[in-house]
């Protein structure tokens, strides 16, 4: 009963380094998302994938790229990390029921960029 | 992007007390969702509201979809220590979940 699994849990990068955050879901959901969470800002959408083979920008996409590898996996890549990207990152997938989209979140990746 | 206004930002209450928090927007939403986030974890869905005026309960939690469709309320009765966390509201218009807008959160602390 894993749900949404994210790795790594914690990461420290130096400015300019690159890294990929991995996400996988086992609920057979079509849609997947990457959010970042900053103090006092709530959750802000970085990128989403409505279905396998498609990706779209969210509210704060600059500095990030994504890959929807297959229906289960959706990765987030930082090509050249900046201190402004220090945040907690959450992956989510969603199901549609009664006209509403319900998001299911992973446990997050805490990223620090020095 | 738009953020929903949640209040209060934080609450310190004693075990056994009732809690009320709300979420307001300048825009109309078709659906309201309430999430709880515990330390080190992702948000977990508590309650979903689908139409204006709807009142829905989940154990000690009760949430209401405002008549104007611009606000929602969450009440927790007889709080216990495990209620500690950050509570987020989220409003959704029609379309995909990419149209979900989150509130800034209410941090709840419960003392014995």
Image: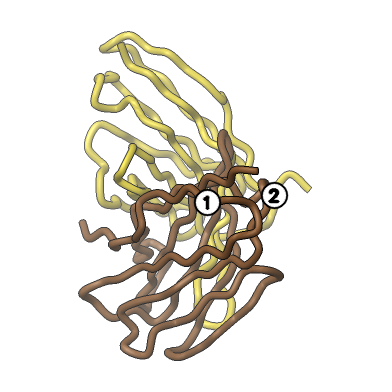
- The quarter of the picture where the C terminus of chain A appears is top left
Helix, strand or loop for disc 2: loop
In depth, the one of B62 and A2 nearer the eye is: B62
Tell me how far mark 2 sits from mark 1, CA to CA. Answer: 38 Å
Residue shown at the point (52%, 63%) measured from the top left: B19
| Left or right: B74 in relation to A57 | right
| Left or right: B32 in relation to B81 | left
Residue shown at the point (34%, 78%) measured from the top left: B29
Dot 1 alpha-carbon crowd within 10 angstroms: few under 14, some 14 to 19, many 20 or more = some
The image quadrant that residue A113 belongs to is: top left
Give the residue number, with chain letter if any, for mark 2: A26
The image quadrant that residue B5 belongs to is: bottom left
Can you tell which chain is drawn brown?
B
Residue shown at the point (38%, 75%) measured from the top left: B95
In the rendering, at what x and y percent does residue A41 appear?
Answer: 30, 45
In depth, the one of B87 and B20 nearer the eye is: B20
**Which numbered disc covers residue B13?**
1
In the rendering, at what x and y percent does residue A76 appear?
Answer: 42, 34
Of badges 2 and 1, nearer the viewer stands: 1
**Which numbered disc covers residue B23?**
none
| Left or right: A28 in relation to A32 | right
Q: Are marks 2 and 1 on the same chain?
A: no
Where B27 falls versus B19 (above or below)? below
Where B34 falls versus B52 (above or below)? above
Helix, strand or loop for disc 1: strand
In the rendering, at what x and y percent does residue B9 appear?
Answer: 35, 51
Task: Give the colour in which the image draws chain A.
Answer: yellow
Residue shown at the point (48%, 36%) measured from the top left: A75
The image quadrant that residue B3 belongs to is: bottom left
Label 1 chain ID: B
């Amino acid at each position: 009963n894993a749900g949404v699994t994210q790795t790594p849990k914690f990461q420290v990068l130096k400015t300019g380094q690159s890294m990929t955050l991995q996400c996988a879901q086992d609920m057979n959901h079509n849609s997947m998302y990457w959010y970042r969470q900053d103090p006092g800002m709530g959750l802000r959408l970085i990128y989403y994938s409505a279905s396998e083979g498609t990706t779209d920008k969210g509210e704060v996409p600059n500095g990030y790229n994504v890959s929807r590898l297959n229906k289960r996996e959706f990765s987030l890549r930082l090509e050249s990390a900046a201190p402004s990207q220090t945040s907690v990152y959450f992956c989510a997938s969603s199901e549609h029921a009664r006209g509403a989209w319900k998001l299911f979140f992973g446990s997050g990746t805490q990223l620090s960029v020095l | 992007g738009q953020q929903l206004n949640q209040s209060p930002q934080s609450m310190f209450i004693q075990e056994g007390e009732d809690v009320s928090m709300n979420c307001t927007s300048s825009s109309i939403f078709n659906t309201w969702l309430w999430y709880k986030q515990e330390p080190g974890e992702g948000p977990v869905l508590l309650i979903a509201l689908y139409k204006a005026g709807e009142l829905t309960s989940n154990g000690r939690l009760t949430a209401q979809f405002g008549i104007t469709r611009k606000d929602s309320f969450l009440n927790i009765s007889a709080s216990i220590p495990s209620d500690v966390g950050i509570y987020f509201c989220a409003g959704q218009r029609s379309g995909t979940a990419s149209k979900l807008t989150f509130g800034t959160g209410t941090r709840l602390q419960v003392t014995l």
